[in-house]
Image (tube, rainbow, N blue to C red):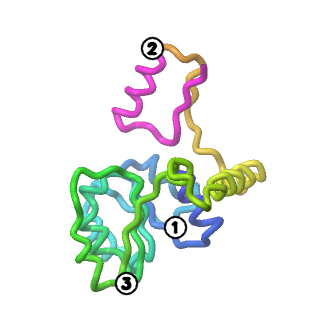
Amino acid sequence: MVWVQLAKQVARLNVIATASREESRQWCLSLGADKVINHNEDIRHQYKHYDLSAPDYILCLNDTDSYFELMSELVAPQGMICSIVESRQSYNMDKLKSKSAGFVWEFMFTRSMYQTADRIKQHEMLNKIAELVDSGKITSTLNKTYSQLSVENIIAAHNQLEDGSCIGKIVLVR
């Protein structure tokens, strides 16, 4: 999870990650998460149990549709929710109004697709991440490399993703 490392090292945030398996929980902690809660259990209850304050920022990397209500409830007043996951429904933004909280989408290719005035920012951000990796300040999340692009390796990689046992990124090399 590069996000955990960037939130800790660049933004200097207190990071609450989610994971359901012990090995993923340990991995999140090793990358710098301050606390890891189980997304298969009642998240509201865990926030109360661990006496966690309302998050100023929430980054949704999985199933915005299922988590929008919860994120709207948890986010701090004047906080921000960001998602990178497509949705199949519209959201009632009135849930965020009384908190003056916001919701934004992040899409890696927006700047290039729309030729925005700040499109060079994408280049600058990727260079900064590369510098952090090269300097060892953040580590790659690459965990498995299949050394040959073949039908068998594609199936194996896909099966690893589907069975939920994957930690980190999988790469297929041509």
Real-space Cα distance between discs 1 and 3?
A: 22 Å
Question: In the image shown, does 29 or 55 lie closer to the viewer?
Answer: 55
Q: Is residue 110 above or below residue 173?
A: below
Amino acid type of disc 1?
Answer: Asp
Q: Is residue 95 above or below residue 67?
A: below
**Label whose residue precedes the other's in the sequence (2 or 3):** 3
Q: Which residue is mark 1?
A: 34
Task: Find residue 121 and report its horizontal and vertical position in percent.
Answer: 64, 59
Real-space Cα distance between discs 1 and 2?
A: 40 Å
**Picture residue at 67% right of the left edge, 52% below the top:** 123
**Picture residue at 31% right of the left edge, 77% below the top:** 48
Instruction: Report if residue 162 is visible in the image.
Output: yes
142 part of magenta stretch: no
Q: Nearer the viewer's eye, disc 1 or disc 2?
A: 2
Task: Find residue 60 and report its horizontal and vertical position in percent.
Answer: 39, 59
Name the quadrant containing residue 143.
top right
Q: Which residue is mark 3?
A: 77
Please tell me whether mark 2 sits on a helix, a strand or a loop: helix
Q: Which residue is mark 2?
A: 151
Name the quadrant containing residue 102.
bottom left
Amino acid type of disc 3?
Answer: Pro
Question: In the image shown, does 165 or 141 lie closer to the viewer?
Answer: 141
Q: Is residue 99 above or below residue 115?
A: below
Amino acid type of disc 2?
Answer: Val
Which stretch is magenta?
Answer: 151-174
User: Is residue 75 rendered to the left or right of residue 121?
Assistant: left
> The C terminus appears in which quarter of the rendering?
top right
Count neighbours of disc 2 (C-alpha within 10 A) and say few if under 14, some if 14 to 19, many if 20 or more: few
User: Is residue 124 rendered to the left or right of residue 25?
Assistant: right
User: Is residue 157 rendered to the left or right of residue 32?
Assistant: left
Instruction: Report if residue 27 is visible in the image.
Output: no
**Label whose residue precedes the other's in the sequence (1 or 3):** 1
